Amino acid sequence: LDEDKMPRVSLFSIDSAKGGEELPSSYRSDQVSENGVSVSYRLSDLQRDFTTIVSKRVGVDLCLNVYKKYERMMKYVVKFLGDKECRLITNSDMKRIVADMKAKYQNSTFANLWVIVKSFITYGINNNRIPNDNLFATIKVVKKTKKVEYLTMEELDRIRNTTYSTPSLQRIADFAILEASLGLAYCDLVSIKREDIKEYNGIRYIQKQRAKTGVEYIT
């Protein structure tokens, strides 16, 4: 295969939270097999390229847990659409994905995961891999506002002053008080280590990253 005769493509600009990345110059507009026959660009190829971009954000503005969600949802799209050629993806495909996801997930979970799926497909559109043919037309995802109920001071005192019959119940009560006092989720509390507890001028505080979002907090 003559390298000089292979079709090259210009670098595609990719919008990201960090100001943009670029595809490696070794990428081609289409993959080329060893015998020189052009092979269509499929969803699995898009998954590979998008993973390269997203993986660079881990530890910067993306935590590992969210990155794993990206991986999981990309695999889902590729499998659900049968690793379809990107140029053949339509609005009908998007509607089928939405219907399938709505049947599997509660509304809030679906809304969060749909953001990931949409960013994956939008990446393909922005890089001229998927036709920008009103792909998301008529697809509206509304995330319902959750009603948040708060414990009263009387309820917290009741939890604090109750005598529990087993150590496990006492542990649950202790965590409930800590969650309310520190404003932390259970997953954040159980991940706290001794080195996360700092001290300044005789005042102790916790400095760590949120388990789900990776955002640093101090409490």
Image: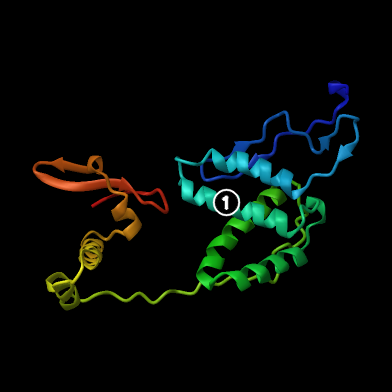
* Left or right: 202 in relation to 79: left
- The residue lying furthest to the front in this view is 166
> Label 1: few (<14), some or many (≥20) within 10 Å?
many
Q: In this view, does 67 lie above or below 144?
A: above
For image coordinates 55% across by 72% down, the residue present is 142
Q: What residue type is labelled 1?
A: Tyr
* Left or right: 205 in relation to 40: left
Residue 39 percent across, percent down from the top left? 85, 40
- Dividing the picture into quadrants, the one containing residue 202 is top left
Residue 43 percent across, percent down from the top left? 74, 49
For image coordinates 65% across by 52% down, the residue present is 75
For image coordinates 15% across by 46% down, the residue present is 204
Residue 127 percent across, percent down from the top left? 71, 45
Residue 56 percent across, percent down from the top left? 54, 38
For image coordinates 50% across by 69% down, the residue present is 108
Residue with the mark numbered 1: 70
Q: Is mark 1 on a helix, strand or loop?
A: helix
Choose between 17 and 191: the one closer to the eye: 191
Image quarter in which the N terminus is found? top right
Q: In this view, does 32 lie above or below 121?
A: above
